Image: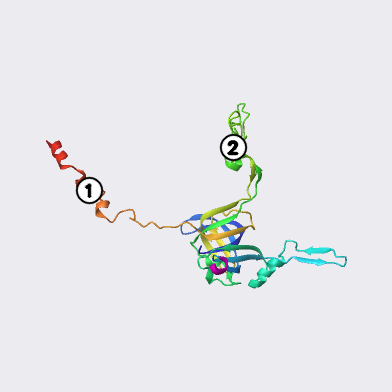
Amino acid sequence: MKKAILATKVGMTQIFNYEDGVLIPVTVLQAGPCVVTQVKTVENDGYSAVQVGYVDKKDKIVTKDGSGRKAIAHRNGVTKAEKGHFDKAGVSGKRYVKEFRFDNAEEYALAQEIKADIFAEGDHIDATAISKGKGFQGAIKRHGQSRGPMTHGSKFHRHAGSMGSSTDPSRIFKGKIGAGHMGVDQVTVQNLSVVKVDPELNMLVVCGAVPGPKGGLVTIKSTVKVHKVKQAGADISKNPQKASGRNPQKASARVNPQKASARNK
């Protein structure tokens, strides 16, 4: 992995490209700043990686009154163990902590900031986030099944349909799609292009939609897909024999002179 960062989804808007005359739907992301909380090495951990933190978080405070009753402030805050980990790195407590296996992980240092300027316009990224929750949904919305006729006396409209034969096997196989909970799944959208980068505000403008609600955590990584620019005339072979579509040597070898002379007689 070459580049990665944690971001927050701000929302969607649109940008007009005056050169091409195209209206581009884009997603605005608050990317970073992230700080390095730990650098893992092959000698100590068996692999090289960089642990980063994102969004400040208050410490969990536990106090006792005269009667020994506990009072907890910021119940979901940073615990003592987490605080010790962050203090060792010299950073404040963070809400989100994630690990990235960078190719150059050994070049990072503790408390180093990773900002949105690691990406540039034209880069392609993969965005990973938790999708919006839709609650309990039917088979049509959840899996895209077809519905039945809505008129002419039909009693089958939006039901799931047959679950299987009753006699044999007389049961429903595992994995059979149907109604159920929809959403709240980890979704990755690949190959999104970066339209604009604002280093001062740490903003990334990405072409297309990104999963998750507004304010949700989004993991942005450099895309795993390889982009190849096809040059003009690349499909034309430089070999004149292949370019002509026929190899005279192979063509002559395929012809049997005895059979050819017999056909001529």
Residue 240: percent from left, percent from top:
25, 54
Q: Which stretch did the figure color magenta?
A: 40-45
- If the image is split into quadrants, where does the C terminus sit? top left
Q: Main secondary structure of the magenta part?
A: helix
Q: Evaluate whether residue 217 shows in this view.
A: yes
Residue at position x 69%, y 68% from top? Answer: 83
Label 1 sits on residue: 250
Residue 59: percent from left, percent from top:
72, 67
Label 2 sits on residue: 173
On screen, 142 above or below 240?
Answer: above
Mark 2 residue type: Phe
Query: In the current view of this chain or complex, which residue is farthest to the right?
Result: 67
Residue at position x 53%, y 63% from top? Answer: 196
CA gap, disc 2 and disc 1:
57 Å
Mark 1 residue type: Lys
Label 1, secondary structure: give it: helix
From the viewer's perspective, tell me whether residue 51 is left or right of residue 256: right
